[in-house]
Amino acid sequence: MNYIVFDLEWNQSPIGQAGEHPRMPFEIIEIGAIKLDKDFKYVDEFRRLITPKLYPKLHKYIRGILNYDERELRKKGTTFKKACTEFLEWCDSDDEEYTFCTWGPSDLSYLQCNMDFYRMPQLPFPLKFYDVQQIYAEKYTKDKKICKLEKAVDKLDLEMTRSFHAAINDAYYTSKILEEGKFGDISDKFTFDIYRHPKTHDEIVMEYHDRKLDYISEEFDNKLMAMADPDVISVRCSRCGRKTMERVDWFQVNSGTQYSVGKCMLHGNMLASLKFKPASDSSKNIFVVKKIVPISKKRYKEIKEKKEILKQKREEKYLKYKEKSEG
């Protein structure tokens, strides 16, 4: 097994949304990757600069953080399709199975968006990968909050021999975090990319791993239909899979998220979170990403209190509206 630790740099319309292409708002201008073996030891590295076609002028913010400019991209860059093809061939060049690793969940989505734009073959589905940012946060940060790559490198006292904000360098530092972070066996700490999602019931993703449950639903016409589906709203123990006893019924945290808490008699309280995701820009359909994780008694109490506070706020808002309409 090899780990492909990769990072991307991308550009966007320099004039904002008015100049944005709806099928590719972020255009990749660099692919950088480090190949590690099963023990997180360095094997090889890959780098390609890409000459942008949609947005040839760099956005001012992008230009400000990169250590190269349009001139170097035109001089040393190649086409995205050629660079991506060579990257995927390099990933598979050792005839070893490989898994992608990234610092955060965005890179895989942007890579696939660019691949779709150029009508390239799709990556496998469902696509598992390792979010090193989250793996690091779960071990090293308070309340498991994510942090920037530079902060993690500094926290682990890694030698800073390369500048940040170049894809190959950020991939290098991410690989060093994996190598030096003492995470042990991470095989169960994968997550699922959701750039592509299940279209039918047969494609639903449901997997128990790392004391968690990941569930990705099929498409629904709307949120009400999703919340009427027993598989979507069931709260199971993320360790044994048994149905839990209801402790906190589903309630809306914000426009896109709902919470519920159930109790497994063997393994304690389980927090279930639902996020509603748009199926595509051309469809009003949605799909659901559900995660279930064990929580402490303290966290259960916080969730219960949160529900009561939100309920009270909604009641107060309704009373104000009623008074205003009647007055």
Image: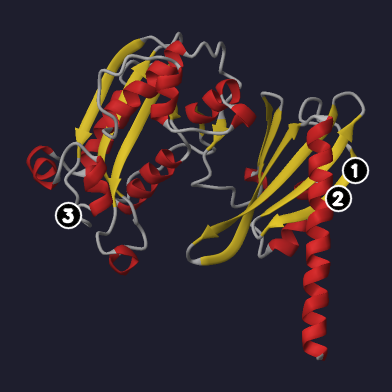
Q: Residue at x 24, y 59 (%)?
A: 14
107 relative position to 288: left or right: left
Q: Quadrant of the C terminus?
A: bottom right
Residue 189's spot in the image, x, y percent? 59, 24
**Residue type marked 1:** Glu
Residue 154's spot in the image, x, y percent? 40, 21
Residue 61's spot in the image, x, y percent? 27, 50
Tell me if I can see residue 210 in this picture: yes
Element class at badge 3? loop
Mark pair 2, 1: CA separation: 6 Å
Circles 2 and 1: CB atoms closer than 8 Å: yes
Residue 91's spot in the image, x, y percent? 34, 24
Q: Residue at x 38, y 28 (%)?
A: 150
Q: Is residue 40 above or below residue 315?
A: above
- Work out which residue is located at the far bottom of the displayed protein and give it: 327
Circles 3 and 2: CB atoms closer than 8 Å: no
**Residue type marked 2:** Asp
Q: Earlier in the sequence, mark 1 or mark 3?
A: 3
320 relative position to 276: left or right: right
Mark pair 1, 3: CA separation: 55 Å
Element class at badge 1? strand
Q: Is residue 323 above or below residue 112?
A: below
Residue that label 3 marks: 56
Count all numbered tags in the image, as a single digit: 3
61 relative position to 230: left or right: left
Residue that label 1 marks: 246
Q: Earlier in the sequence, mark 3 or mark 2?
A: 3
**Residue type marked 3:** Pro
85 relative position to 221: left or right: left
Element class at badge 2? strand
Residue that label 2 marks: 249
